[in-house]
Image: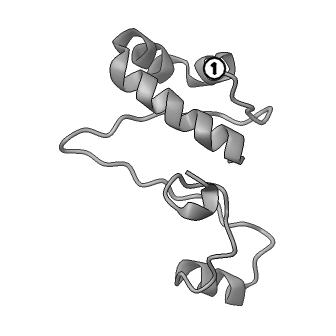
Amino acid sequence: MSQGNAALAGRIVAKAWTDEAFKARLLADPATVLRREGMDLPAGVAIRVVEDTGTARTLVLPAKPADLTEEELGRVVGGADPSYCANWCLCCANCAI
């Protein structure tokens, strides 16, 4: 996720929290809503939006980057290499969120 898309994602989440009709559209047709909000989405990629609840949480298991060696992957997973960012999460300073 680019830095621009990451910042936009935060605004979309905030809008969904305050606008039930927007949230319903986002859950029903995420790609259309995200594009209308200005998000740059790759062609041919399916987009799913799920909502966490008080009793259910979502863990996204991203695809393993094809260009990482096992050693590099070990450093990323272990947190030893903060310079590498897979751009798939919304939870670290590397993504400028």
Q: Position of residue 39 (x, y in %)?
A: 69, 29
Residue behind mark 1: 37
Q: Is residue 91 above or below residue 23?
A: below
Residue type beneath disc 1: Glu
Q: Is residue 65 above or below residue 87?
A: below
Q: Residues within 10 Å of mark 1 (few under 14, many from 20)?
A: few
Q: Is residue 81 above or below residue 31?
A: below
**89 left or right of 67 in image:** left
In this view, which residue lies farthest toward the top? 21
In this view, which residue lies farthest toward the left? 55
**12 left or right of 75 in image:** left
Q: How is the image coloured?
A: one colour
Q: Is residue 14 above or below residue 29?
A: below
Q: Position of residue 38 (x, y in %)?
A: 69, 23
Quarter assignment of residue 59:
bottom left
Q: Position of residue 48 (x, y in %)?
A: 53, 34
Quarter assignment of residue 31:
top right
The residue under the point 37% across, 14% down is 19
**40 left or right of 18 in image:** right
In this view, which residue lies farthest toward the bottom? 71
Tag count: 1
The residue under the point 65% across, 34% down is 46
The residue under the point 58% across, 58% down is 62
Q: Nearer the viewer, residue 4 or 60?
A: 4
Quarter assignment of residue 68:
bottom right
Q: The residue tagged with tag 1: helix, strand or loop?
A: loop
The residue under the point 60% across, 33% down is 8
